[in-house]
Amino acid sequence: HVSAFPDNFLWGAASAAYQVEGGHDADGKGPSIWDIFSHQPGTTHEGTNGDVAADHYHRYREDVALMAEAGLQSYRFSISWPRLFPEGRGKMNPAGLKFYSDLIDELIKHGIKPMITLYHWDLPQALQDIGGWESRETVDAFEQYARLCFEAFGDRVELWSTFNETLIFIGMGYFTGAHPPGLTDAKRGIQACHHVFIAHAKAVKAFREYKDSRLINKKSQIGFVNVMQPHDPISDKPEDIAACKMADDLLTHWLYDPVLKGEYPAHILEIAQRTWGVPEFADGDEALLKSNICDFIGVNYYKREWIAANPDVDNTKINTTGKKGSGKEFGFKGLFKFVRTPESTYSDWDWEIYPQGLCVGMQRLKDRYGNIPFYITENGLGAKDPIIEGEVLDDPRIKYLSDHIAAAESAIKQGIDVRGYYPWSFIDLLSWLNGYQKQYGFVYVDQENNLARKRKKSFFWYQNVINSNGTK
Ligand code: BGP
């Protein structure tokens, strides 16, 4: 068929520093909260951590060559803040800066556009020690870090995003306790989250100053990456519909409105008052949010959630085993819960597979925020891939991704401004809580054989997709 994807559509793939790089203490890098947290007993799946990960830090040239072979047009990766500032602020580590500078050059040499995420969860531990995101000092340190990145890479990098998925790092860090700093204190989480929005706004402001002074390329854009998790009520009972609306407000609008509308709308603050707490504003916060709306939104789409009223369940533990059906219902008592239905299809981690959700989710966001540019910054299937006679035959991944690409194409036909697609992930890497058993890549990393890279079946499939601009 004729492709609905525009000619300048970007076919990419995504990763994050802690999950792919390894080299956790190489060349002067400081520890991040994940370096510390993952070494505490009982925090991750079988004690796995990112000390070595896929060792991309040392093998990035080989990895970029593979990206080029696949035909990748863009690569989304994050910068490890404690590689640049081992203490989070103050003294900069030139070796860290050089690593990213070399990586960027290598990508550009192969015709691959870098898309940088400034914060994909690996906060310098030194900043956590002074209060992490609960402290305004972390906001200032983030601005210093962001400025360094703009100054060092702004001439070569056009696509930037500040943060990845507030829902997850704040939700898991402060509400469920599964991520660092491991707290279960909603009020503190809400304040930390507010500081993230302020840090984002300050970075956007700095970015635009640099653009005006031509230090950053005029075509450059800066965005924010969020989880896109459409919610649907499990029945048409009024209580399920109300719970679904609550989930939308608490898990979606709370996290999108400040960056796309530049405010928390009154009804969110009213709900905040009744539930998790209202963030404290400092002088100037309101104006900062209002005047620094970002250029695009990155959406990470994996699943939809069916929502039901929840008078009883208080469980925030998720399936981290990959044993289908072992996950319990997730819910905040009195607010909402996530339920599974026999009519839906699920991955081995109990994530619903619902391709149309990609289109539906963006349409709902468009209805609320207008026709903003979208990048699909993550999408993928986590699985224990079968190896048959030495070949990684990941057919379920191919099916998952091609169905989602079809949904992205329908979105474009519907008039949604989708500019790029970045499957998670290019090579197999660490899953935060699921270790190395939950694989997402086009390239297999052999843990038993010196981390040797091997192209999976999906690698060749994606090569064709890119070659045909999404028609194959
Ligand atoms: C997103 C994160 C990624 C990645 C992905 C897959 O939330 O941005 O970093 O990990 O989810 O999740 P998981 O590894 O839990 O399967």
Image: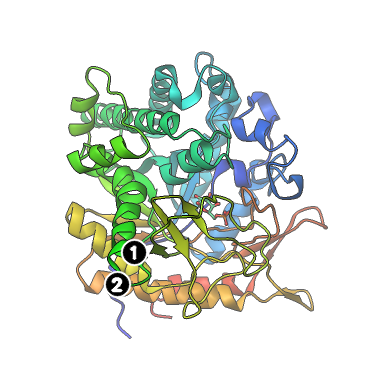
Picture residue at 42% right of the left edge, 42% below the top: 166
Can residue 99 be seen here? The reply is yes
Farthest top residue in view? 90
Closer to us: 342 or 401 = 342
Place residue 397 in its image quadrant.
bottom right
Q: In the rendering, at what x and y percent does residue 179 appear? A: 58, 40
Q: Is mark 1 within 8 Å of ligand 1?
A: no
454 relative to 367 in the view: left or right = right
Mark 2 in CB contact with mark 1 (< 8 angstroms): yes
How many numbered tags mark residues here? 2
Picture residue at 53% right of the left edge, 21% below the top: 127
Can residue 8 be seen here? The reply is no
The amino acid pointed to by label 2 is: Asp
Q: In the rendering, at what x and y percent does residue 385 appear? A: 68, 70
Disc 2, SS: loop
Q: Which residue is mark 2?
A: 236
Q: In the rendering, at what x and y percent does residue 193 appear? A: 39, 33
Distance from the alpha carbon under mark 2 to that under mark 1: 7 Å
Q: Is mark 2 within 8 Å of ligand 1?
A: no
